[in-house]
Structure formats: C-alpha cells, structure tokens
Amino acid sequence: MALKELEVKYATKRDRDYKLADGGGLYVLIRPNGSKLWRMKYRFEGREKMLSFGSYPDLSLADARVERTKAKALLDEGKDPGAREDAPASAMTFEAVAREWHALRLDTLDPGHAERLMARLERDAFPALGRKKIGDVTPADVLAMVRKAEARGALDVSRRLKQHVNQIYRFAIPNGWAVHDPAASLGDALKPKPRVKHMARVGFQELPALVRAIDGYDGEENPRRRAITRAALLFTLLTWARTGETRLARWDEFENLDRGDPLWRVPAERMKMDREHLVPLPRQAVALIADLRVYKTSDFVFAGEKPNKPLSQNTMIYGCYRMGYRGKQTVHGFRGIASTWANEAEIYRPDWVEMALAHSDEDEVRGAYNSALYLSPRRRMLQRWADMISGLIAPPHAANDRDQSDATVAVELAAQAEVPVRRSLP
C-alpha cells in the first residue's frame, strides 16, 4: 500500500531502525535518532543494490517518487541507476562519487552498517562537500566539516568522517576524477581523543563481597522490580556486556537456549563499534533468562515499569548505590574486573578478551564477519568466569567438586592450546 505524506511526517522514532514502504522498492528508513532517509532497493544484473535519495522533509514523498521513476526508467533501458560512469570528470561532484563508492561496496558490507555509513555522509559530509566538484575539495573544506562534528562532541564520528573521505578519494583518484586526497594530511589536525576515564571498580579481593551483595540485592520494595534489577546486574557481570546492551536486550536476540551452544546476538545498532556482537552464554546466564520469563510483559528481557519499555538508564547504577558502592563500583566497571581476571590468568589470549569485550579494529569491511571470531574459546572463557562467580555466591565444599574443577581446567587448557590464533567460526 502506498504511503501518505502524513504517515511519513508523523512516523516516530523507535529503539531500532524500521522502514515504511511505498512500493516499487521505495521506502523511508526511520532511525533511532529520528532521521528519515529515502532509500530504494533494486536489482541489477542479478545483484541487489540500494539507492539513497536524501532525507525527509528536505525531499518530500512526491519528490522521492520522482527519483524512483527516474531510476526505474534507467533500469528499463538496461542501465544501473546507481552508476555514474558516463559523467565527465569535470561534472563529478563529491556526493556523486561518494554514492558510487558506496554502491560499489554494498555487496561487501553488512546491510545495517551500509545504512549507517550513508546516513553519516548525508548528515555531515554532503551538506558541506556534496555539491563541490570532487577535484575542487580542499583540506580546509574537509577540516571544516570534521570540526562541526567535533564541536558537538562526536569525536568518534569526526574520525570516521575523515576515514570515509580518505576511502572515497582512494576510489576517485584511479578513476581520474581527482588527483589528490584532501584528507590525507589531516591526522595531526584532528582533535585528540580525551584520556580514557576508567569507571570505578573494586579490587579483585573485594569481588566476593560485591557478588554476594548483588545476589542478595534487596534495594527495592517491589518484588518484581527487585528481581529484574538483580538479574540485570548479574547478567551484565556474567556476560561482560555494557549497560545499554543489557537493558535493551530483547527476547528474540537469544538463540539455542535449550541447546549446548546458547547465544546472544546483539544487533549492530546497539553496539559502540556499530557491529553485530555475538555473546556465547554461560549456563548461569541462560538460567537467569529462564527465571525472568515469569516477569515477561514486553519485548524486553529486562522490562521496566512502563508498558513495553526497558529498564531505565539509571536503574542498575542506582542499584549499586543502594548496595553501598557509590563511588566504588559502576556497572561499566564490571567489564574492567572481568578483563583484569582474564588477562592476569595468562591462559586466555588477548584477542579473545578483546572480542569478548566487543573491542575491535577499525576495518569496516571485516567488521561484518568479526562477531564470530574465537567463539569457542570465548565460550569456555566466559563459562570459567561464570563458574568462578557462582563459586563466590555458593562456594563448593566437597573435595570431589574441587577435583572435578581441576580436571575441567586441565581439559580446557589442552583444548585452548589447539585453537589457532585467527579463526572465523560459524
């Protein structure tokens, strides 16, 4: 069914991207930040491709339909509407080249990442550089564009924009549309990232008391809210997740909970690195999720008080405060404790730890595949961590328990010794 202008105008933002289709491949993509972007999917020579027409309301529904008609006409002529090969170098604008560069990479990029990349260009790069001829853009032009992102505090975005310009010119120069990269010398001109401020966390010797405080959490009178807050804190501790990743977790993100390889698939839009993250779940995390089904009232695993809303942003940190850890321990600090434990154990490779923490490199093409790296050793590592946490709650007393634990460690170390340094797992 065709869209109406009012449907587009009053479409509200949600926690994740969603689309409103108009037909013929045309749709408007509504982002979590409220932006509305016109897209058109089409097939050319057997491959699915995508066109970006601009944003609403700058481009109305009627105008977007005109662009769709133009694209369809080119397809009927056997031409790719996303290509600009017949345009002379003197007529190639930065935006035209950028869109062609983007279209060329669609087959190698995760669809969600491709959407975010184009949205970044449309929001920041095209207004500043888009209408300039590709060969006329100067380093000062690029720096001015980057400075605007820096001015709103988006230092990560500013660096990505500079990186995108580099990539666009590496595409443009061999095609004869430009002779130099105006972003090549901007590295030292970018605003440096601020020093990392480590979140407060207790020392490892204080971890047993913290774990028992979380397990016995009684900081709220409402039994349902108390149970969900306790579960959210424990789940975050067990999985090394960030607060936002936990509180926005949805039931449909969990896979194989009744099998031996349970998994949490965190979508890219919720990750700091804009990439899907796979979390192999230890048994204790699976049990927490199962226990929470009795409180299921919405799509969110850790449901808030309002209908179909997650826990509020401050629920878990306030829980730490109620346990007496104000200024001593933050929820994000759980990750620091886990990282210290894993690195000091000296049996877990650093890249396993970094992947478990969802730290990654800046290679955006490989980013679509990185989420499954080291999945098996990460599963063993998180299970060992979870077993240790469980032991702090209810320490084992029987000698045979200790013997079994020692045997498990020996088997695990032998298995880890056989894992290759780089391995992509399904």
Image (cartoon, helix red, strand yellow):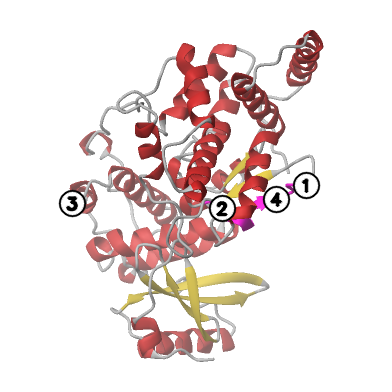
Q: Which residue is mark 2?
A: 301
* 3D distance between C-alphas at marks 3 and 4: 46 Å
Q: Nearer the viewer, mark 3 or mark 4?
A: 4
- Residue nearest the observer in this picture, 122 or 278: 278
Circle 1: is it few (<14), some (14-19), or many (20+) Cα within 10 Å? few
* 3D distance between C-alphas at marks 4 and 2: 13 Å
Circle 2: is it few (<14), some (14-19), or many (20+) Cα within 10 Å? many
The mark tally for this picture is: 4
Quadrant of the snapshot with the C terminus: top right
Amino acid type for the residue under numbered disc 4: Glu
Whichever of callouts 1 and 3 sits on the residue coming sooner in the sequence is 3
Q: In the orientation shown, which residue stands out farthest toward the front?
A: 221
Whichever of callouts 3 and 4 sits on the residue coming sooner in the sequence is 3
Residue at (66% x, 38% y) in the render? 281
Q: Nearer the viewer, mark 1 or mark 3?
A: 1
Q: Residue 91: percent from the left, percent from the top?
A: 32, 71
Q: In which quadrant of the rendered view does residue 100 lie?
A: bottom left
**Residue 254 on the magenta segment:** yes
Amino acid type for the residue under numbered disc 1: Asp
Residue at (35% x, 60% y) in the render? 121
Image position of 328 with respect to 83: above or below: above
State which region is magenta: 249-258
Q: Which residue is mark 1?
A: 258
Q: Which residue is mark 4?
A: 255
Amino acid type for the residue under numbered disc 3: Ala
Circles 1, 3 touching at the beta carbon (< 8 Å): no
Q: Residue 314: percent from the left, percent from the top?
A: 35, 45
Image position of 7 with respect to 241: above or below: below
Q: In which quadrant of the rendered view does residue 416 lie?
A: top right
* 3D distance between C-alphas at marks 1 and 2: 17 Å
Decide if residue 164 is in sight here. Answer: yes
Residue 144, labelled with which disc? 3
